[in-house]
Each structure stands twice: as C-alpha cells, then as structure tokens.
Image (spheres, rainbow, N blue to C red):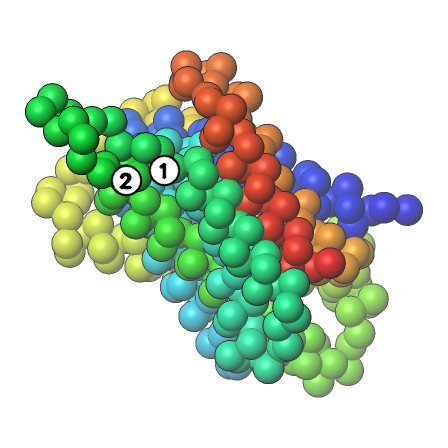
Amino acid sequence: MFLGEFISLSVAVSWTVTALFAEVASKRIGSLPLNVARMVFSLVLFVLTLSLVMGVPYPRFADGPTWGWLLLSGLVGYVAGDYCLFQGYILIGSRFGQLFMTLSAPTAALMGRLLLGEQMRPLAVIGMLVTLTGIALSILSKRTPQKGEAGRHHGLQFNLPLRGILYACGAGIGQGAGLVLSKIGLQHYDAAILQHGLTLEMVPDGALIPIPLSISMPFAATMIRTVIGLVSFLTLLLLFSRDGTGQLRRAVHDRKSMLCALGSTFFGPFVGVSLSLLATQYTSAGIAQTLFALTPILIIAPAALLFHQRVTVREVIGAMISVAGVSLFFV
C-alpha cells in the first residue's frame, strides 16, 4: 500500500542529496569533468546491475526504436539538461538550481501535447502560471535606488546572475523534454519485450536476482541514456574545452570531488532516475511528479546548513508556490 508514493518521495530525497553532492564537486572541478566522472560511475553501476537482474551486462530485448528514442532522451535530458544544471550550480547554487527544475513539469506537458497528443487541461495552464510566479517571487526583488537616482522608477531586479538563471532554465526544460522522450522510449521497450514472447511480469532467463522485467527495465533504459551521456560529455570536454585531458586528470586526482561525484551518481542517475521510472508503475504519474517536485523545498534546510546560505521567507514561499504549481498539472 502506498508503495508508489513511497518510491516517489524517495526520488525527491535522492535528488536532494544528488544536488548537494553535485554542487560541491562542480565548484571544485567544473561541470564537464564532473559529468564525465558521473557517467563513468553510472555505467559501471548499470553493467553490474543488469548482469544481476537481466543475466547480461547490457539492455536486453531493447530494439532499434527503443535505443533511438532513449538515446535522444539522454542527449536532451542528460547532456543538455545536466550540463546546464551543473553550470547553474556553479553560478547560483543547488538550492536555486532545483527551484528552476520545477519548469520540467510545464515543459513535459507541452512536449506531451506536441509528441504524444496528450490533452492539456485548464488547470495545467494555471499550473504553469503558478509555477512561474513562485520562481519569480524567489529571484526578483525591488531594485535598490543608487546614489543620485532618487525619484526615478526603478522596477525589479534579479537576485541572481542572469547567466545562472538561463542555465537553470535550460536544465528544467531539458529534464521535462527528456522525460517525454523517455516515455516514448519505454513504450517501444514494452513492445519489444512483447515481441520476444515475454511479459513485464516475467523474469528473464539467466537473471541471478529474480525480479520481473517491470522493475529491471527502467535500469536498462537509464543505462541507454547513460551511454550517450558519456560519449557526449567526453567529446565536449576533449574537443571544446581548453586542456580537456588536463582537467580530467586533475579531477581524477581530486579525492573529495570524486567521492562527491560517486555520491551524486549513485543517488542521481542510478537510484533517482531509475526509481522515477519505476514509481510511475505503482502510482499515477500525477502523484509521482508532484512528489518528485518536493526537492526545491527539501533542499532548503540542508543547503542553508552545509553552505551557510541565507534563506529568506520570500524564497521559501516562492519554492512552495512553485511546487504547488507543479501539483496542478496532475490534479
């Protein structure tokens, strides 16, 4: 009872821990080296996991369309989304970075409408406006008059660097779009399994841990996304970064960063993403997505304690309004 809700809440906690680990590591070694390390760690974890639950170290039964859609999902969600997210962590921190991740809900709704023909109810439109209002409340304030500007209309100003805001927006949009592409990929995966004469309740031959495909399949799907993530981040680092090999070498020798990268990997791509796909099989997508969205609230206290960040009442209220806006998409 309430298994799906418990899994969904675990995802929110997992992503909170991931964000804290990632902020520490990204500020020490940079976004691209961190993402390369995370993808390597993630791939190792998935090879071991699939060997145990599917009997082979790769996504068993996945056909061409499955690989195609999940690779595209990884390119959008992992590569573009995570790169923007970790750049955002460097500039505005994980607390605000996670606040902008609430943009994934309206993005997913729009993408679902465009790619899957899903209907957008009036409450979804209201949810978009409420989510944007919560974000605006957190990052905008009245502009402080400068000396000699008395009597002029000063309007509003951002509390955060504009580059950080743009990166964080890109992260939220990337995750939302990647989620819809993943859903299409999983639909193809379901069909591919059925074509092999199997059902999602069956355990594949050779599996050392006898769990049904409905549970192991999300891990296999996430591994496919990890493959394109590793290839893309490594290519970006080596071709477009100054002294990419040197950055990677220094990152590997930074023990604290590697431990944080491992923690971010375990709680992010391995546990968090896989459980997020699993949660929707045990509860409605609406309840799952609403509980996932609690991360911007859950992260406030640990971020303030660990990074000595000043948290205002306005920012807390803004985060709560944004999460409330997300919930309206699924009422």
**Residue drawn at (16%, 45%) of the image:** 244
**Residue drawn at (24%, 27%) of the image:** 144
Which residue has dot 2 on it? Answer: 155
Distance from disc 2 to disc 1, alpha carbons, whole Å, reads: 10 Å
**Residue drawn at (20%, 27%) of the image:** 145
**Residue drawn at (44%, 53%) of the image:** 172
Question: Which amino acid is tagged 1?
Answer: Leu
Q: Secondary structure at mark 1?
A: strand
CB atoms at circles 2 and 1 under 8 Å apart? no
**Observer-nearest residue: 312 or 55?**
312
Residue 278's x, y, as percent? Answer: 70, 55
- In the rendered image, the residue lying farthest to the bottom is 195
Residue 32's x, y, as percent? Answer: 28, 45
Which callout, 2 or 1, points to the residue nearer the camera?
Answer: 2
Q: Secondary structure at mark 2?
A: loop
**Observer-nearest residue: 269 or 40?**
269
Quarter containing the C terminus: bottom right
Residue 51's x, y, as percent? Answer: 62, 54
Question: Which amino acid is tagged 2?
Answer: Gly
Query: Visible in this render: residue 55?
Result: no
Give the class, few, some or many, for how many residues have Cα within 10 Å of label 1's Cα (few <14, many ≥20).
some
Relative to residue 288, is residue 41 depicted above or below? above
Say which quarter of the image contains residue 146.
top left
- In the rendered image, the residue lying farthest to the right is 1
The mark nearer the N terminus, 2 or 1, is: 1
Which residue has dot 1 on it? Answer: 140
